């Protein structure tokens, strides 16, 4: 990796995207998010300290020089979940435009943005195309792709739209990484010690065999019980959620039994096997390393950090694909000089 591949991370969360870029050899020189509760976790696990600031208040001139900007503006307002199809009229959606302003101000060689598939759904696609046009207006060639993390070394079915912009004066055609032919199963969870149940208060660390290896217990809503929520060992897990209550069931339990349409139950005689993933397991399904320690006062914040993250291995695959292309471009220049 040549010197100078510096990254500004916006909407950093606990830094899944950042870690993937770091593993690919980039340096994160600045990271920011407005959620104070993330800071301890971010600072403990990354070399850069998290700047806690609302992006709308960020002083663009204070940002360091960089080669790339990465970030995942909030997805709530674009999400298909719960039919919240409000698009950028919603204030949280409008934050996307701050992201564009920062890119225009810093003019990095490239940027990467991540969002939920809802951003390119029928109801949002027109607005999405407007966003793409804006990126073009400020001088970027933009490509996007709905990627399923399970083809990129992630044991989880997680579809996300990745948007990559390359500054138009840089002469190469970005291509998304190909990924493998087969989806990854959940074998990474095998052999782990049993996790500890909690209703929301974290255990003392000494109480846990592995850090963050505690799972939320609480009622299962009728919505939760309207589908099977168990994937077997050889299948990728369902998408890791940001909400403690919505975590799916560990694969040691058999698949659920259908009673009727939208009404399922735990398999009779096996009820004791059903429990949600622990935070540590959710982190493993998001391909965070085992030494990535999460700090939180409420168990729900642990799940939230992990569930909001870009899987590290997916981020790394995207990071490497850009790096490869940049190298290609440099090699081409060399050939002709
Ligand atoms: C999808 S998460 C990003 C996850 C992160 N890229 C990762 O891989 O771990 C979006 C983040 O945007 C932050 N956020 C939302 N609105 C913001 C704002 N106005 N200013 C700064 N951060 C904001 C949230 O706190 C959240 O952590």
Image (cartoon, rainbow, N blue to C red):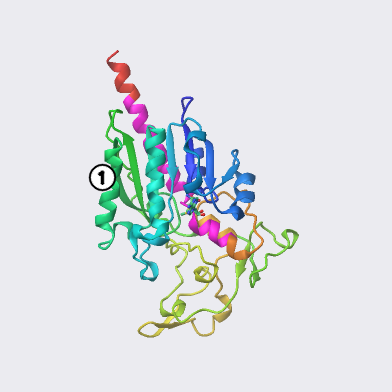
Residue 57 visible to an observer of this rendering: yes
Q: Name the residue under label 1.
A: 133
Judge from the rendering whether residue 160 lies leftward or rightward of residue 141; answer left or right: right
Q: What stretch is highlighted in magenta?
A: 302-329
**Picture coordinates of residue 175 (x, y %)?**
30, 39
Is-magenta flag for residue 324? yes
> With respect to residue 84, does 46 lie above or below?
above
Residue, x 27% and y 40% (percent of image)? 136
In front here: 93 or 158? 93
Query: Which image quarter is the C terminus in?
Result: top left
Image vertical order of residue 32 relative to residue 123, above or below: above
Q: Nearer the viewer, residue 33 or 110?
A: 33
Q: Residue furthest top?
A: 337
Q: Position of residue 73 (x, y in %)?
A: 43, 51
Q: Which residue is drawn at 37% across and 67% down?
A: 84
Crowd tier of the residue under label 1, counting other residues whose Cα lies within 10 Å: few below 14, some 14–19, many 20 or above: some
Residue 188 appears in the picture as rendered: no
Judged by its main secondary structure, the magenta piece is helix
Would you place residue 14 above or below residue 46 in this image? Answer: below
On the image, which quarter does residue 211 sit in?
bottom right
For the residue with label 1, is its CB less than 8 Å from the closest atom of ligand 1?
no
Q: Residue at x 33, y 60 (%)?
A: 87
**What is the x, y in percent for residue 287?**
51, 51
Residue 16 is inside the magenta segment: no
- 274 vs 119: above or below: below
């Amino acid at each position: 990796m040549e010197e100078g591949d510096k990254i500004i991370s916006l909407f950093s969360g606990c830094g899944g995207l950042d870690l993937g870029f770091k593993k690919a050899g980039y340096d994160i020189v600045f990271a920011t998010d407005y959620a104070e509760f993330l800071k301890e976790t971010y600072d403990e696990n990354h070399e850069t300290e998290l700047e806690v600031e609302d992006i709308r208040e960020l002083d663009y001139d204070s940002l360091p020089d960089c080669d790339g900007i990465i970030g995942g503006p909030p997805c709530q307002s674009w999400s298909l979940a719960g039919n919240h199809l409000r698009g950028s009229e919603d204030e949280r959606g409008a934050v996307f435009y701050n992201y564009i302003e920062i890119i225009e101000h810093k003019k990095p060689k490239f940027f990467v943005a991540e969002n939920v598939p809802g951003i390119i759904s029928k109801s949002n696609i027109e607005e999405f195309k407007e966003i793409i046009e804006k990126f073009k207006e400020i001088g970027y060639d933009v490509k996007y792709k709905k990627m399923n993390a399970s083809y990129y070394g992630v044991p989880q079915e997680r579809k996300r739209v990745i948007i990559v912009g390359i500054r138009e004066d840089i002469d190469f055609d970005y291509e998304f990484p190909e990924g493998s032919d087969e989806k990854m199963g959940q074998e990474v969870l095998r052999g782990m010690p049993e996790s500890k149940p909690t209703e929301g208060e974290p255990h003392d660390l000494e109480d846990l065999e592995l850090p963050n290896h505690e799972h939320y217990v609480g009622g299962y809503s009728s919505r939760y019980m309207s589908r099977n929520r168990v994937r077997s060992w050889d299948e990728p897990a369902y998408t890791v959620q940001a909400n403690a209550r919505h975590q799916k069931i560990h694969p040691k339990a058999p698949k659920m039994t259908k009673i009727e349409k939208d009404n399922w139950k735990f398999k009779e005689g096996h009820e004791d096997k059903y429990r949600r993933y622990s935070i540590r397991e959710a982190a493993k399904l998001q391909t965070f390393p085992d030494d990535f320690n999460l700090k939180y006062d409420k168990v729900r914040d642990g799940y939230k950090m992990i569930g909001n993250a870009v899987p590290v291995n997916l981020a790394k695959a995207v990071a490497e694909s850009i790096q490869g292309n940049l190298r290609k471009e440099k090699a081409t220049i060399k050939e002709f000089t």
